[in-house]
Amino acid sequence: MNERQFEEAVARMVQGDKTGLKEIYENYVGYIYRIIYEVLQSRENAEDVTSEFFIRLWNRAGQFKPGNGHKGYLATMARNMAIDFLRKHKREELTALLQDLGSGPEEEEAAGQGRMQKAESEGVYASSAPSGVEEKVLGDMTVSQALETLKPAERQIVSLKVLGELTFKEIASYLEIPMGTVTWKYQNAMKKLRRCGYE
């Protein structure tokens, strides 16, 4: 399905014609399911969220803005819905993922403290290690600021790579750009994050 066909299908959806949704569903149900499954790692949950995705796509058809690439739009919506599902149903699993994506400072601080308590209870830190703990917490709290230094395309690629655990080849396919471009943007993004003290 090319851009023009997708835009025509959405235009029909806006007019209340469900054949537009049916066409999009038939072309992209597998694509959407894979993105959601990569985040949730649960077949049952991924199927549920995929079903909800197409209901939301129908309800929000009027919000689609042509010209920005429909596959990226679909991928972003699918990924956000999967993250929302985790936030509501799997809070503990999400905590570890949020630190990599740059969540709010309170959530990051809580995640950092949780990791410290776990490490301390397991005897990971020796008596000379407090400075390392402090550096780790400070590092966690600057992730969101570090991510703000990235361009939108770099943030999207880092998000797909880190949260979705997608390969560069899969990201290139999803975003419809060359794999070399994906790896170059990802490496540039990681350099920027390292300059901000984020590994």
Image (cartoon, grey):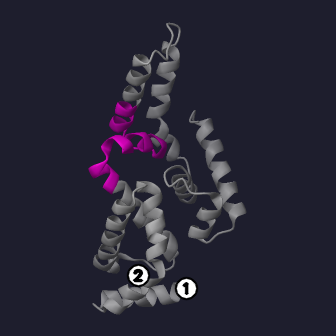
Disc 2 versus disc 1: distance between alpha carbons? 14 Å
| SS for callout 2 | helix
Question: Which residue is found at the position 34% from the left and 40% from the top?
Answer: 92
Tell me the kind of residue under disc 2: Tyr
Residue 2, numbered circle: 1
Q: Which residues are magenta?
A: 85-111
Main SS of residues in magenta: helix
Residue identifier under label 2 = 25
Q: Badge 1, how many Cα within 10 Å: few under 14, some, many 20+? A: few
Residue situated furthest front in the rendering = 43
Q: Is residue 141 magenta?
A: no
Q: Position of residue 105 (x, y in %)?
A: 37, 37
Q: Is residue 95 left or right of residue 68?
A: left
Tell me the kind of residue under disc 1: Asn
Residue 154 vs 19, above or below: the answer is: above
Is there any visible trace of residue 30 in the rendered image? yes
Residue situated furthest right in the rendering = 180
Q: Position of residue 137 (x, y in %)?
A: 45, 26
Question: Which residue is found at the position 58% from the left and 33% from the top?
Answer: 197
Residue 198, numbered circle: none
